[in-house]
Image: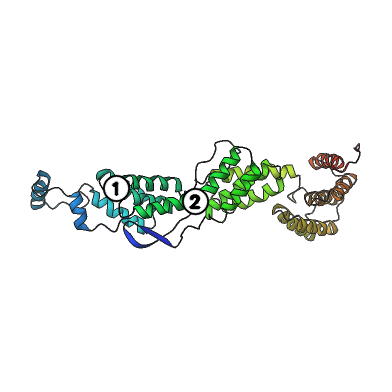
């Protein structure tokens, strides 16, 4: 798929403006575990051309009435009813200022008052494209072509349609594969989208990768994707709250002690700092670095309970690094050191699972 031309942002009113393309946001499935959707001009009409399109004949009653009013009373601009031309000019101003949402509203108002100005459908498509709402952009590009197939911007509209369909194809493929339960293949297609999108939509693709990995039981990788997506998603996005929920659930399922509040390290700044470094590395999926930092925290710690909990965390790192025998030894060592509470139960569960994976006999605790 050829990259979209980000160096162009032309719209019908100002052909010299560069046109830009960014990512779309097609609708997503409604299930709680569904992946995120990607919430994706004619040359300036001069006054004479607009007057020919919009103004009534000079001998019409409306024209005569306006002349009579003008000669009798000077009506202020604010008192006059809006005309298609005024809406058109206001839309152009909004577009130039980057307020594409307002520009859409004004273009639509102008189009409703003067349906013969079909080229405004192209303008509206341009605005939706620049708002990254590619689904609606495609709708309006196609509408413009259907109404003016040989119009001055039909060729550009067809080019945009081709580019946007090419951009959306990997996303649509990923969504279909996800709906079919083929999470591994869906993850491949979502990954391809990462190079084509930015900002909020890049965050949505990271969220979708988190969904795929969680459904594949790759909890550590899923946690990393969810945490990364929070850096790019708006906190007003519904997927932000969902990502936070999955992060909390995955941290609990991974069983790593992610905080120092319940560790007796208040008076040991060195151990506490090493533990915090390990926590940050673990949450980023950097288990080798986390293991080194936990080891330094263990060496600096003096309290027996703290050492038992840190040993459990070291076991977690080794398990996620694929070192099953080492992880098993450390889980059971943490239990022998007096590990208590929720992590005691988890350590026993991991111990039995690893023994089974290694072909070792079960152990009674």
Quadrant location of residue 152?
bottom left
Circle 2 or circle 1, nearest the eye: 2
Q: Is residue 361 above or below residue 128?
A: above
The answer to the question of whether label 2 and label 1 lie on touching residues, with beta carbons closer than 8 A, is: no
Q: Residue 89, percent across and down?
A: 28, 55
Quadrant location of residue 274?
bottom right
Question: In percent of the image, x 41 and y 50: which residue is there?
Answer: 128
Q: Residue 62, percent across and down?
A: 12, 45
For label 2, the residue is: 166
Can I make out residue 235 in this image? no
Dot 2: within a 10 Å radius of its alpha carbon, few (fewer than 14), some, or many (20 or more) residues?
Answer: some
Out of 250 and 144, give the one closest to the viewer. Answer: 144
Q: Secondary structure at mark 1?
A: loop
Q: Is residue 300 left or right of residue 164?
A: right
For label 1, the residue is: 118
Can I make out residue 158 in this image? yes
Q: Residue 54, percent across and down?
A: 20, 49
Q: Residue 125, percent across and down?
A: 38, 50
Out of 40 and 362, give the one closest to the viewer. Answer: 40
Q: Secondary structure at mark 2?
A: helix
């Amino acid at each position: 798929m050829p990259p979209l031309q980000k160096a162009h942002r032309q719209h019908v009113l100002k052909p010299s403006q560069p046109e830009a393309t960014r990512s779309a946001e097609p609708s997503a499935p409604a299930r709680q575990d569904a992946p995120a959707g990607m919430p994706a001009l004619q040359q300036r009409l001069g006054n004479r051309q607009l007057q020919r399109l919009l103004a009534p004949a000079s001998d019409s009653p409306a024209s005569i009435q306006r002349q009579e009013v003008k000669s009798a009373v000077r009506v202020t601009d604010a008192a006059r009813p809006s005309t298609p031309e005024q809406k058109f000019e206001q839309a152009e101003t909004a577009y130039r200022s980057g307020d594409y949402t307002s520009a859409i509203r004004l273009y639509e108002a102008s189009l409703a008052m003067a349906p013969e100005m079909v080229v405004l459908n192209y303008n509206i498509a341009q605005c939706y494209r620049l708002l990254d709402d590619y689904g609606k952009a495609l709708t309006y590009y196609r509408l413009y072509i259907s109404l003016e197939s040989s119009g001055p911007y039909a060729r550009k509209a067809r080019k945009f349609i081709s580019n946007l369909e090419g951009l959306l194809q990997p996303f649509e493929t990923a969504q279909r594969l996800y709906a079919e339960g083929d999470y591994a293949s869906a993850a491949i297609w979502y990954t391809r989208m990462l190079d084509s999108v930015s900002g909020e939509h890049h965050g949505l693709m990271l969220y979708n990768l988190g969904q795929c990995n969680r459904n594949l039981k790759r909890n550590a990788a899923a946690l990393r994707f969810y945490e990364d997506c929070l850096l790019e998603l708006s906190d007003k996005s519904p997927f932000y709250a969902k990502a936070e929920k999955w992060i909390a659930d995955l941290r609990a399922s991974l069983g790593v002690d992610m905080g120092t509040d319940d560790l007796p390290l208040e008076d040991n700044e060195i151990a506490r700092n090493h533990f915090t470094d390990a926590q940050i590395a673990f949450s980023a999926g950097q288990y080798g670095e986390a293991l080194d930092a936990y080891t330094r925290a263990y060496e600096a710690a003096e309290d027996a309970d703290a050492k038992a909990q840190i040993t459990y965390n070291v076991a977690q790192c080794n398990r996620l690094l694929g070192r099953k025998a080492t992880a098993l030894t450390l889980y059971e060592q943490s239990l022998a050191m007096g590990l208590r509470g929720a992590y005691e139960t988890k350590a026993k569960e991991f111990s039995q699972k690893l023994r089974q994976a290694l072909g070792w006999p079960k152990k009674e605790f």
